[in-house]
């Protein structure tokens, strides 16, 4: 069923929750891009409101698509999307989601199994034309994420992931470093491999984009999904310290690790590091250079 669109938050709440209105609104922290509130309604329903400026509606539209596409794999939990839209009175765009508490401990083994099952799921519902890409362009953090379909994963990753990020970060690099970027892109092609199967990815999978769901399992939130190589997803889980060992052991029971992953992991994480450079500024400049020089030294 298509997720409904509304032109005011009041209209959304009344339509979705039987004329309910807001009894209390509590700020929820944790997001670096959007604002969020826990809404308690007059009928007792508790919902999660995520919102931002008026012109961020495309961000929430694509989040709806990603969540619906992940849910359609029937492999892992994602929150229900009640609706989304704009509110001219408060000059905001918003999305209304199932409210989840994150106080319970993670079942890392089950999470590893379910994520691998999601990566093994059929991807035909997630892309039109080509093998790698997505139904639409979306966002990685606040930056655009281009999902033009390609039949080659290596071609897709170089042309739709690394090249746009380096283009947007152009002002950070010297002439010599720009020459190194060109050399890096060429060398990366020789280390990347074509997957034996395409995988639907969450796309922005770090610990902050997971939560314990109503079934006491780990669920996925805040995706920037696309069809790609499952290694790109695993790589990001290691970017900020990694998950517990039992997660990776469980994952590799279903999809065994392939030789050379450690080198490819750094190539995949360069995408996120340069993206952070574009979003948050120069504090990620040296980390981006270090990942580049590491491959160039091989």
Image (cartoon, helix red, strand yellow):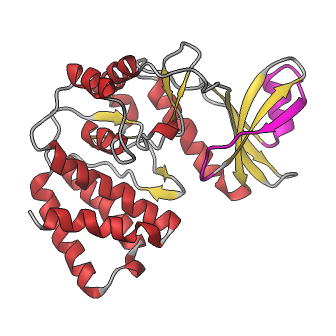
Residue 227 in sight from this viewpoint: no
Which residue is the extreme one toward the bottom?
A: 175
Q: Is residue 293 left or right of residue 190?
A: right
| Magenta stretch: includes residue 73 | no
Residue at 79% x, 20% y is 45
Give above or below for 6 relative to 91. above
Does residue 32 show up magenta in the picture?
Answer: yes
Residue at x 88% of width, y 31% of height:
22
Above or below: residue 281 compared with residue 68: below
Q: Position of residue 258 (x, y in %)?
A: 13, 35
User: In the picture, residue 253 is in which quadrant?
Assistant: top left
Q: Is residue 241 visible?
A: yes
The image quadrant where one finds the N terminus is top right
Name of the residue lying farthest toward the top: 215
Q: Which residues are magenta?
A: 7-33
Q: What percent of the width, then of the height, locates residue 152?
A: 19, 48
């Amino acid at each position: 069923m298509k997720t409904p669109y509304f032109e005011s938050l009041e209209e959304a709440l009344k339509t979705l929750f039987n004329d309910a209105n807001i009894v209390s609104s509590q700020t929820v922290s944790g997001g670096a891009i959007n604002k969020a509130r826990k809404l308690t309604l007059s009928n007792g329903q508790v919902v999660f409101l995520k919102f931002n400026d008026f012109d961020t509606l495309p961000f929430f539209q694509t989040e709806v698509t990603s969540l619906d596409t992940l849910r359609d794999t029937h492999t892992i939990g994602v929150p229900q999307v009640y609706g989304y839209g704009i509110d001219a009175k408060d000059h905001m765009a918003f999305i209304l989601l199932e409210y989840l508490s994150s106080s319970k401990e993670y079942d890392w083994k089950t999470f590893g199994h379910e994520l691998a099952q999601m990566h093994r799921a059929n991807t035909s519902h997630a892309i039109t034309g080509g093998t790698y890409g997505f139904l639409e362009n979306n966002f990685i953090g606040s930056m655009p994420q281009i999902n033009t379909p390609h039949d080659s994963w290596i071609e897709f990753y170089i042309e739709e992931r690394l090249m746009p990020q380096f283009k947007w970060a152009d002002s950070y690099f010297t002439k010599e470093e720009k020459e190194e970027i060109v050399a890096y892109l060429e060398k990366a092609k020789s280390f990347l491999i074509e997957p034996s199967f395409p995988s639907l990815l969450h796309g922005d999978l770090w610990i902050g984009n997971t939560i314990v769901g109503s079934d006491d399992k780990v669920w996925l939130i805040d995706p920037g999904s696309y069809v790609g190589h499952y290694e790109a997803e695993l790589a990001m889980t290691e970017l900020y310290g990694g998950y517990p060992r039992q997660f990776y052991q469980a994952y590799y029971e279903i999809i065994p690790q392939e030789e050379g992953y450690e080198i490819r992991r750094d190539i995949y994480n360069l995408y996120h590091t340069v993206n952070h450079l574009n979003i948050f500024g120069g504090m990620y400049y040296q980390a981006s250079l270090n990942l580049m020089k590491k491959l160039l030294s091989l």
